Each structure stands twice: as C-alpha cells, then as structure tokens.
Image (tube, rainbow, N blue to C red):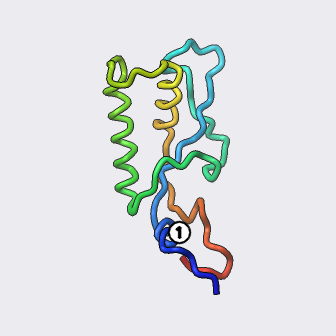
Amino acid sequence: MHKRSSTVTALLAGWLLMSPPPQKREGAAPGLGSYGQDLSVPVSKWKQEGAFDTAAECEAAIVRTMDDLGKAQGSDAMPVHVDLQARMQAAASGARCVPADHIYPAAVGEQP
C-alpha cells in the first residue's frame, strides 16, 4: 500500500489559485492594456500561485492581489517595468480557484 505524505493529502483536499499564461495583444501599445490571458491553455498547465484550505480563502487572495495591483498603479510602491506590470495584471485578472484534485488527481485506486 502506498502512503501519501500529509502535505500531499492536505493539498488534495484544498483549493489552488491558478493563473493563465499572459498573452501579448497584437498591435497593443506598451502599458496596462497590452496583455490578455491565453485561456486556450488547459487549467492544469496554468501557473499555481497559491494553495488554500477553502474556496473562500482562495477567492479572497484574488481580491487582495487585484487590490494591491490597483494601489500600485501609478505609484512608486511597485517600481516595475510597465510591461511586467501589464503581464501581472493580466494574470491576476484571469486567475481562478480550482479544487486541488482537479490539478493533482488521486492515483487510480487511491483515496485522498
């Protein structure tokens, strides 16, 4: 019998914050509208941004991230290149909370 570590077992019961890869919009000038999300990529291939015990905690993380990015726009609080900030904004705005077992399914015959 194969035993999973408690970390993996806990992860399978939680929620993952996933963000899609950014996609440069053709012909867009550099700036905050220059990137969108490549939603054609399966969620399982998106970047994992965090792991949470509940969907509510995961959704709250999306709200906090969007708030932080909004506050940082036009301020010296986040002195990053405009292009990088545009990619971060696009990824955050497309972020989704998904059950961990959607990304890391239990092996056949095993229970989380």
Residue in the image at 61% along x and 72% along y: 106
Q: Position of residue 3 (x, y in %)?
A: 58, 81
Residue in the image at 37% along x and 25% along y: 78
Front residue of 62/39: it is 62
Q: Position of residue 102 (x, y in %)?
A: 58, 62
Q: Is residue 88 left or right of residue 76?
A: right
User: Residue 37: which quarter of the image?
Assistant: top right
Q: Position of residue 50 (x, y in %)?
A: 46, 51
Q: Is residue 45 left or right of residue 67?
A: right
Q: Is residue 32 left or right of residue 72?
A: right
Name the quarter where the N terminus is drawn: bottom right
Front residue of 7/13: it is 7
Name the quarter where the C terminus is drawn: bottom right
Q: Across the whole image, how many numbered discs are drawn on residues?
A: 1
Q: What secondary structure is found at the residue carrying circle 1?
A: helix
Badge 1 amino acid: Val
Pointer 1 residue: 8
User: Residue 70: which quarter of the image?
Assistant: top left
Q: Residue furthest bottom?
A: 1
Q: Quick check: 41 above or below 58?
A: above
Q: Quick check: 88 above or below 10?
A: above
Q: Quick check: 63 above or below 72?
A: below
Residue in the image at 60% along x and 37% along y: 21
Residue in the image at 38% along x and 50% along y: 59
Q: Quick check: 19 above or below 51?
A: above
* Callout 1 crowding tier (Cα within 10 Å): few <14, some 14–19, many ≥20: few
Q: Position of residue 74 (x, y in %)?
A: 35, 17
